[in-house]
Amino acid sequence: MNIKPAAAAGTITIFDGKTVNRMGFGSMRLTGPGIWGEPRDPDECRAVLRRAVELGVNFIDTADSYGPEVAERLIAEALHPYPKDLLIATKGGLVRPAPGVWEPDGRPEHLRAACEGSLRRLRLKTIDLYQFHRPDPKVPFEESLGTIIKLRDEGKVRAIGLSNVTVAQLEAAREMTEIASVQNRYNLGDRRSEAMLDRCTELGIALLPWAPVSAGQVDTESPQARDLARHKGVTPYQLALAWLLHRSPVMLPIPGTSKVKHLEENIAAAAVKLDPSEVAIVAA
């Protein structure tokens, strides 16, 4: 049996009936400079998405704010009708009034409109995983999450995730509903969400680390880590992704790129095996 590269890291169950390979793809880079507007090479971006699926990626993360709207549209253009095993996760709750500007909007009317817009662009009847992109300090957290719960009850959302939240917010959300995933920034150089990762590991909730290699800035500059990468015949970025996969069984990295060659390098990291001593070298 031919095992596809993205499956080399094993699988994780996001919710009942939906298990995915633990090397996903993040679509944020399928847009113009600054995550704004159309990409320089839309055909290459669509090729990236198709190649990701060929390599066994069956978890693609996106958001209405990427572009805005550009990444979701490209996903549908490249992959619809979707493979049966593909889980597309999107997010709502951030707006983009201008390039480089990201503003939270957790008002119920906005979240409902955002979800319905994502459904149209992705050509879906139900979004498998809908994530609240960022809590809005102007709107009670429970009010925003309550809207997404209503969307789920209406059949527009299958499972609910959170993004850019604290452990306390995760626990508050779990009092209201089941949470399938958390997406926080986490990588070798930024481990501020360590407590969140530990809690997700305890609960068996998928942790989607955004900026898993810090947009190309990888903190593997120690001589020991550089020597290890050379010894294993991998790049520092592959080593950083492998470290994430070994950090916890609930880790689901979603590295993104707009180039097929770079995509292939990222996915190959799923097969990089590290023993405990090597994990410690990378983490040091």
Image (cartoon, rainbow, N blue to C red):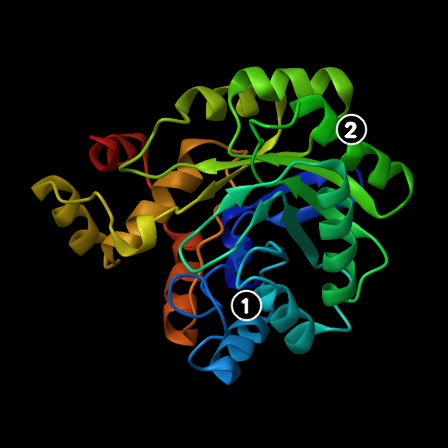
- Asked whether, in this view, residue 103 is left or right of residue 173, the answer is left
Observer-nearest of 221 and 152:
152
Q: Is residue 123 visible?
A: yes
Circle 1 SS class: helix
Q: Position of residue 246 (x, y in %)?
A: 41, 37
Residue 35 picture quarter: bottom left
- Asked whether, in this view, residue 232 is left or right of residue 182, the answer is left
**Quadrant of the drawing holding the N terminus:** bottom right
Residue visible at 45% across and 63% down in the picture: 29
- Look at the picture and state if 30 lies above or below 61: below
Observer-nearest of 120 and 210:
120
Lower sequence index among marks 2 and 1: 1
Q: Which residue is mark 2?
A: 146
From the image, state whether disc 2 or disc 1 is nearer to you: 2
Q: Amino acid at mark 2?
A: Gly
- Report how far apart the C-alphas of labels 2 and 1 lie in the structure: 34 Å
**Quadrant of the drawing holding the C terminus:** top left
- Look at the picture and state if 197 lies above or below 83: above
Q: Residue furthest right?
A: 154
- Look at the picture and state if 53 lies above or below 230: below
Residue visible at 55% across and 47% down in the picture: 22
Q: Position of residue 197 (x, y in %)?
A: 47, 26
Q: Is residue 273 visible?
A: no
Graded by Cα atoms within 10 Å as few (under 14), some (14 to 19) or many (20 or more), the crowding at tag 1 reads many
Observer-nearest of 36 and 258:
36
Which disc is residue 52 wearing?
Answer: 1
- Asked whether, in this view, residue 22 is left or right of residue 88, the answer is left
Decide: marks 2, 1 in contact (CB < 8 A)?
no
Q: Amino acid at mark 1?
A: Ala
